[in-house]
Amino acid sequence: MKQLAFIGIGVMGKCMVQNLSNAGYTIHIYTRTKEKVIDIIDETIIWHDSIASCVREADIIMTMVGFPKDVEDVYMKEQGIINMSKKDAILIDFTTSSPTLAKTLYQCAKEQGKHSLDCPVSGGDIGAKNATLSIMVGGDEDMYLQILPILHVVGKTVHYIGPAGFGQHTKMTNQIALAGAISGVCEAITYAKAVGLDVETMLQCISQGAAGSWQMENMAPKMLNQQFDPGFYIKHYIKDMTIAKKQVDEKNVNLKILDNVLFMYKTLEENGLGDLGTQALIKYYEQ
């Protein structure tokens, strides 16, 4: 069985590592703070104190970090993944990051005889826990076919999209659609409260019809119960929408809903709420 390494054991990464372990894989992991992963370390999840040590013997190396700068650091630094991994290693970045950076990583890896794939995921902490993530893959198709069994351990819907960067471009479309979906849920709840409807009954009425969505089913109850723990951080969604906006601005495309929702989330972050979950958008409407 191939040796696996995983770097970035946060809310989603921890669940993905556990699912891989439960499927019979041994995974070498690196995170800067061992205490954050002490609860999952065992004979099949082995912690390392450096990236170099973690990836040196791995055939497949996976990452799930926060921001494009984090991706660049773990891959491109002197002691990073591209330099310290062995020849023919397959590098899988699950982070939602820049399509331009994904193409840079692909080229740098190729120059050293390695293979890079951008594989951003959608589904949040619930999808990571239940192994129902949607995974969008950019890179060489033959490498995609080699890692497909691994991807099916952590995700339910897996698609090869095209060359390097196309996975990230597809994730941008997901985040753009999400902007409309989550703001729509917030506005429905705000309207219902304003006219005196029972909000829970309202949601039961409309959630199974044409207005139904994953956001309405999973996030609306959290909004009503003031449950704002992050499955997906506001600060990370701002990062995603900012990447998407940069891409569309370069193409002279105007996406007004994206602009409006990005403004609302930035306002929440400026008010110190960036570490809450994206469902906390309802707080903007409550102001």
Image (tube, rainbow, N blue to C red):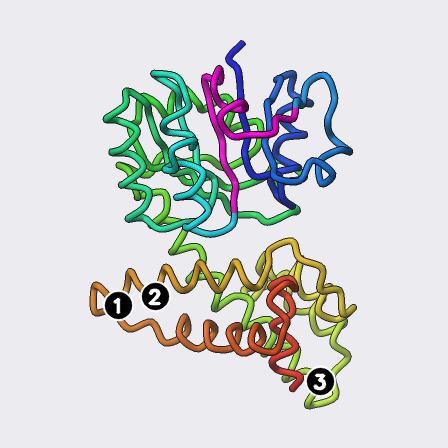
Q: Is residue 111 above or below residue 224?
A: above
Residue 60 located within the stretch drawn in magenta? yes
Looking at the image, residue 112 sits to the left or right of residue 151; the answer is left
User: Could you say which is closer to the camera, residue 135 or residue 81?
Assistant: 81
What residue is shown with label 2? 245
State the CA–CA distance, disc 3 to disc 2. Answer: 32 Å
Disc on res. 249: 1
Badge 1 local density, few (<14 within 10 Å), some, or many (20+)?
Answer: few
Please provide the residue range marked out in magenta: 47-65
Image location of residue 248, percent across then percent down: 28, 64
Disc on res. 199: none
Instruction: Say what secondary structure mark 1 lies in.
Output: helix
**Tag count in the figure?**
3
What residue is shown with label 3? 193
User: Residue visible at 37% across and 29% down?
Assistant: 82
Q: Is residue 127 above or below residue 208?
A: above
Asked where in the image residue 112 lies, by quadrant, the reply is: top left
Q: Is residue 160 above or below residue 174?
A: above
Q: Amino acid at mark 2?
A: Lys
Q: Which residue is most to the bottom? A: 195
Asked where in the image residue 166 lies, by quadrant, the reply is: top left
Q: Amino acid at mark 1?
A: Asp
Looking at the image, residue 95 sits to the left or right of residue 103; the answer is right
User: Could you say which is closer to the camera, residue 61 or residue 197?
Assistant: 61
State the CA–CA distance, disc 3 to disc 1. Answer: 36 Å
User: Residue visible at 53% across and 20% down?
Assistant: 4
Instruction: Say what secondary structure mark 2 lies in.
Output: helix
Q: Amino acid at mark 3?
A: Lys
Badge 2 local density, few (<14 within 10 Å), some, or many (20+)?
Answer: many
Q: Which residue is most to the front? A: 78
Residue 49 located within the stretch drawn in magenta? yes
